[in-house]
Image (cartoon, rainbow, N blue to C red):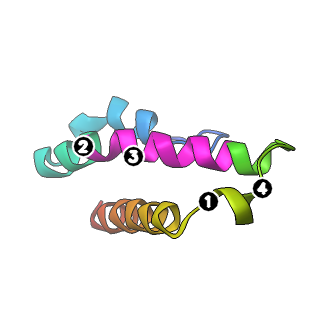
């Protein structure tokens, strides 16, 4: 796409700022997925930034894991099409 990658993990806003370089279908799919990708980022931050009150093996459920996997798979599938 000719975009310099940022130095952070959540890149959906950078991609959407350049949505004119995408097909309309892909841009719309990413817009729909944006909220879920933001949720995924917040979960990563909770896990990685030493929240001593949060124990992942206790506080995440199978439902959370399945949601995270589903979001990641959708984003990967769209990314491969780009």
User: Which of these two is toward me, 66 or 59?
Assistant: 59
User: Which of these two is toward me, 43 or 31?
Assistant: 43
Which corner quadrant holds the C terminus? Answer: bottom left
Task: State yes or no: residue 35 in magenta.
Answer: yes
Q: Earlier in the sequence, mark 2 or mark 4?
A: 2
- The residue that disc 2 covers is 32
Disc 1 vs disc 2: which is toward the camera?
1
Q: Position of residue 61 (x, y in %)?
A: 56, 64
Q: Position of residue 41 (x, y in %)?
A: 56, 44
Q: Which mark is residue 36?
A: 3
Check the image and name the residue furthest to the left. Answer: 24
Disc 2 secondary structure class: helix
Disc 1 secondary structure class: loop
Instruction: Mark 1: give few (<14), some (14-19) or many (20+) Cα within 10 Å.
Output: few
**Taking 6 as reference, is 25 above or below it?**
below
Q: Which region of the structure is painted magenta?
A: 32-45
- The residue that disc 1 covers is 60
Disc 3 vs disc 4: which is toward the camera?
4
Residue at point 60% right, 39% down?
6
Query: How far apart in space, not on screen, are marks 2 and 3 (Cα)?
Result: 8 Å
Q: Which mark is residue 55?
A: 4
Q: Earlier in the sequence, mark 3 or mark 1?
A: 3
Residue at point 16% right, 48% down?
23
Tell me whether the residue at label 3 lies in contact with that at label 1, contact meaning CB atoms closer than 8 angstroms: no
Q: Position of residue 10 (x, y in %)?
A: 54, 42
Disc 3 vs disc 1: which is toward the camera?
1
Q: Earlier in the sequence, mark 4 or mark 1?
A: 4
């Amino acid at each position: 796409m000719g975009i310099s990658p940022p130095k952070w993990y959540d890149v959906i806003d950078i991609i959407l700022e350049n949505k004119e370089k995408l097909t309309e279908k892909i841009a719309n799919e990413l817009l729909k997925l944006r909220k879920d990708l933001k949720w995924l980022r917040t979960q990563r931050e909770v896990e990685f930034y030493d929240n001593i009150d949060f124990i992942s093996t206790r506080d995440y459920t199978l439902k959370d894991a399945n949601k995270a996997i589903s979001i990641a798979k959708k984003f990967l599938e769209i990314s491969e099409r780009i």
